[in-house]
Amino acid sequence: AKGPQTTRSVAQALKRSAKETGIEGPLVGRLEGETSFVTGGDVVGPAEVHVAHAWDGSFADLTAALLKDAAGDLDRMYSIDLFSTDLLTPPDDPIGTVQRLVGGASKVLLVLDEDALALRR
């Protein structure tokens, strides 16, 4: 049986899809100008919270943690590297990229799993 879907497996699926369709750039760039059908707010914008997570952690657990952190604020913006970096073209300066993502947010949310797994890539 297939185990839980990890953040890494979601990234790999997004990467395959982008290659197959010829789409370039980070996912958030493709969503610029889109609005939420629930709230009417923008779906992309400056992030208040940067999310640090484990790539081999459960993607469902990551999204559950974000829902809990948002506490009902469906327009709260999060910076998640999975969606805010170009998965097809690795950055020339990965450390600088992470520093910019973290520096652009006023808070950092560290998501751990039951084994305290985090920050492994």
Image (spheres, rainbow, N blue to C red):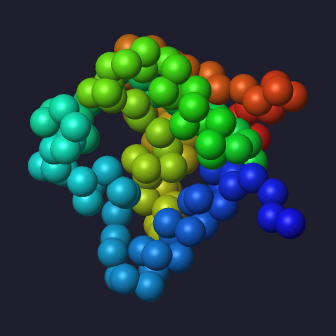
The residue lying toward the viewer, choosing from 50 and 10, is: 10
Residue 75 horizontal/vertical position (percent): 27, 27
Q: Where 42 sits versus 49, above or below?
A: below
Q: Quadrant of residue 59?
A: top right
Residue 62 horizontal/vertical position (percent): 60, 36
Q: Is residue 121 visible?
A: no
Q: Quadrant of residue 79?
A: top left
Q: Residue at x 82, y 27 (%)?
A: 114
Q: Quadrant of residue 44?
A: top left
Q: Residue at x 37, y 83 (%)?
A: 21
Q: Residue at x 35, y 82 (%)?
A: 22
Quadrant of the frame with the N terminus: bottom right
Residue 8 horizontal/vertical position (percent): 66, 56
Count of labels in the image:
0
Q: Is residue 118 visible?
A: yes
Residue 83 horizontal/vertical position (percent): 43, 50
Q: Where 36 sits versus 83, above or below?
A: above
Q: Where 116 sits versus 90, above or below?
A: above
The residue lying toward the viewer, choosing from 67 and 109, is: 67
The residue lying toward the viewer, choosing from 97 and 49, is: 49
Q: Is residue 59 left or right of residue 71?
A: right
Q: Where 45 sits versus 26, above or below?
A: above
The residue lying toward the viewer, choosing from 65 and 118, is: 65
Q: Residue at x 33, y 75 (%)?
A: 23
